[in-house]
Amino acid sequence: MSKEPTEGRRERKKRQTREAIAETAMRLFAERGYDAVTIADVASAADVATTTVFNYFKTKEDLFFGAFTPPTELLAERLRERAPGVGPVPILRKLLLEALVGLSARDAHEHHHRIRSVMAASQALQAQAMHRFRARRLESLNQVAAALTAPAEPDAFALLVAAQMLSQVDGAMGLAEQGRRAGKDPVRCALEMRSALDRACDALEKGLGDYGVQPAPSASTRRAKKAAG
């Protein structure tokens, strides 16, 4: 059994710095409005140099959009890491359930409320959101399709399957958003969605059969890995 990669001290420090800068930026955006906050303001409030902020975020827009990774962008990464014998739908199901758990947390609920408030008050962010959504969605579609068929190149069928999987993620996030707007308790909303997501994943898995199941490595590949240490 392969071991999970462990995060080294240097990597942990970098992640913590990035998260601290992003959290500081979001707090300032919520307090003052996105348009009124500069990168220098964020650096000062986070007690880091302006150059440090630029090491992690190339633009002010990245401070807002790059601070979090939506589940749609995690899907390809998870698919690439799936073990031999595992198909794509169990990966999708696990990712959706993790997202539900995160959405049901009170701090996550408040965080999403802050994001929506900042977005609503800035036309610049709204325009950026449309542009970035299109670009990132196309990238996610291609990445998921490639992960489904690797090492072979993805075909039209892989792209259609990838689109269905991403649509399930979008649907789950959309239902959660509807629940928040309706004032539903986040925990109750997550429990209600769990059954629907299971049914949707079951239907997709039945339709796909053994498509996308990660094959076991060949004997030559195993020998090469063993020789590499």
Image (cartoon, rainbow, N blue to C red):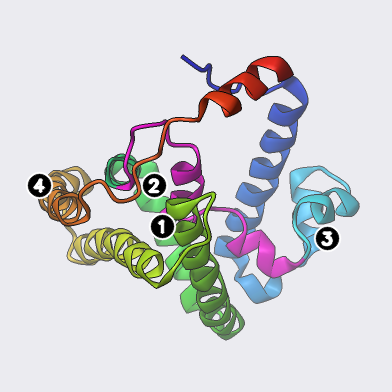
Question: Which callout, 4 or 3, points to the residue nearer the camera?
Answer: 4
Mark 1: amino acid: His
Asked if the residues shown at circle 2 and circle 1 are in contact, with their CB atoms under 8 angstroms apart, the answer is yes
Secondary structure of the residue carrying numbered label 3: helix
The residue segment tinted magenta is 59-88
Mark found first going from the N terminus, 2 or 4: 2
The residue located at (66%, 23%) in the rendering is 224
Which residue in the structure is indicated by mark 1?
Answer: 112
Measured in 3D between alpha carbons, the distance from the residue under mark 3 to the one under mark 2, in whole angstroms, is 27 Å
Residue linked to disc 3: 40
Disc 1 residue crowd, few under 14, some 14–19, many 20+, Cα 10 Å: some
Q: CA distance from mark 2 to mark 1?
A: 6 Å
Q: Earlier in the sequence, mark 4 or mark 3?
A: 3
Asked if the stretch drawn in magenta spans residue 78, the answer is yes
156 left or right of 11?
A: left
Mark toward the viewer: 3 or 2: 2
Write down the residue under mark 2: 108
Q: Are marks 3 and 2 in contact (CB under 8 Å)?
A: no
Would residue 80 be counted in the magenta stretch? yes
Label 3 crowd bin: few (<14), some (14–19), many (20+), radius 10 Å: some
The reply to whether discs 2 and 4 touch (Cβ–Cβ < 8 Å) is: no
Q: Is residue 93 above or below residue 28?
A: above
